[in-house]
């Protein structure tokens, strides 16, 4: 009887594990993007730090920036701490324009949002959308490449190529945590599959009382240059 009970218990455990694995596999890339989008849309404001390394012309450099956003207004503020060439630069983005404050020259360049998107960097990564990961990911044809961890705290990996014309044939990877449906990491890869940028998302906070006036604030004495 004990042997039969033990076998029954083992069989039940395997069945539950299999069911959990099947549940994880039912999420598609579109499902994950939808959940990420829904989580960001319900937030009054959000902030996070994006940090890591990036390689340009074979030379690695540190990347460190902080992001504050009010999703309902499509308003975001990005402050650079690294690389050194961009330290203390500030980018303010809304629905219509991108205002880029250059600390060394005390100038503010103003560009339309559409033009800024067309000037996206490697593999079409548009840093004017960096506060809205679901919108950013939608610029890529993505597929689900991984699902690790246990129910409630799984980490999903998405990989895709940019839909933007004129970008290279590199790829981007986005990692999303099931806990709160938030982004945790972004990687850029070249056409050979080598990682050229590896950026981690940390200090992710929701509803901390950010105001539009605070996010839009730039030095009043800066020269304005419209592009």
Image (spheres, rainbow, N blue to C red):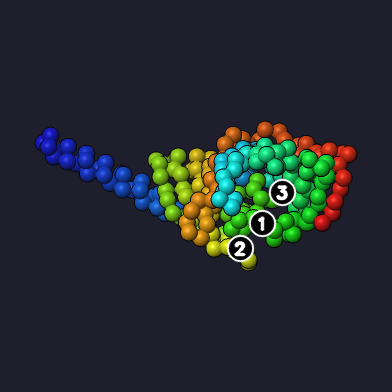
Name the disc covering residue 120, or none: 1
Residue placed farthest to the front in the image? 58
Does the rendering let one see residue 182? no
Left or right position of 212 against 138: right
Report which residue position mark 2 lands on.
167
User: Of helix, strand and loop, which one carries label 3?
Assistant: loop
Residue 136 locus on image (x, y percent): 61, 53
User: Which of the two discs, 3 and 2, sits closer to the camera?
Assistant: 2
- The reply to whether callout 1 and callout 2 are in contact (CB within 8 Å) is yes
In the image, residue 225 above or below residue 82: below
Residue 115 or residue 156, whichever sits in front: 115
Report which residue position mark 3 lands on.
74
Name the disc covering residue 172, or none: none
Residue at point 51% right, 46% down?
176
Residue 28 locus on image (x, y percent): 47, 56
Residue at point 78% right, 40% down?
103
Residue 212 sits in which quadrant? top right
Residue 79 or residue 150, whichever sits in front: 79
Residue 148 or residue 107, whichever sits in front: 107
> What whole-number distance in Å separates the C-alpha atoms at marks 3 and 1?
18 Å
For label 3, count other residues whose C-alpha is less than 10 Å away and answer few (under 14), some (14-19) or many (20+): some
> What whole-number distance in Å separates the C-alpha atoms at marks 3 and 2?
25 Å
User: Of helix, strand and loop, which one carries label 1?
Assistant: loop
User: Of helix, strand and loop, which one carries label 2?
Assistant: loop
Which of the two discs, 1 and 2, labels the residue nearer the N terminus? 1
């Amino acid at each position: 009887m004990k042997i039969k009970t033990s076998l029954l218990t083992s069989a039940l455990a395997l069945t539950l594990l299999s069911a959990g694995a099947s549940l994880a596999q039912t999420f598609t890339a579109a499902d994950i993007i939808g959940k990420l989008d829904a989580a960001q849309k319900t937030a009054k404001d959000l902030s996070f730090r994006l940090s890591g390394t990036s390689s340009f012309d074979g030379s690695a450099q540190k990347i460190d920036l902080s992001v504050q956003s009010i999703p309902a207004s499509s308003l975001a503020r990005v402050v650079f701490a690294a690389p050194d060439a961009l330290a203390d630069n500030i980018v303010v983005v809304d629905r219509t324009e991108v205002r880029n404050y250059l600390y060394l020259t005390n100038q503010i360049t103003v560009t339309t949002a559409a033009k800024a998107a067309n000037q996206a960097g490697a593999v079409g990564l548009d840093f004017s959308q960096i506060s809205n990961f679901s919108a950013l990911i939608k610029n890529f044809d993505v597929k689900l490449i991984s699902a690790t961890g246990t129910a409630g705290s799984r980490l999903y990996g998405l990989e895709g190529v940019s839909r933007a014309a004129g970008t290279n044939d590199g790829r981007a990877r986005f990692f999303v945590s099931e806990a709160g449906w938030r982004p945790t990491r972004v990687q850029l890869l070249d056409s050979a599959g080598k990682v050229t940028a590896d950026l981690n998302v940390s200090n992710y906070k929701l509803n901390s009382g950010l105001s539009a006036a605070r996010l839009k604030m730039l030095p009043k004495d800066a020269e304005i240059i419209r592009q």
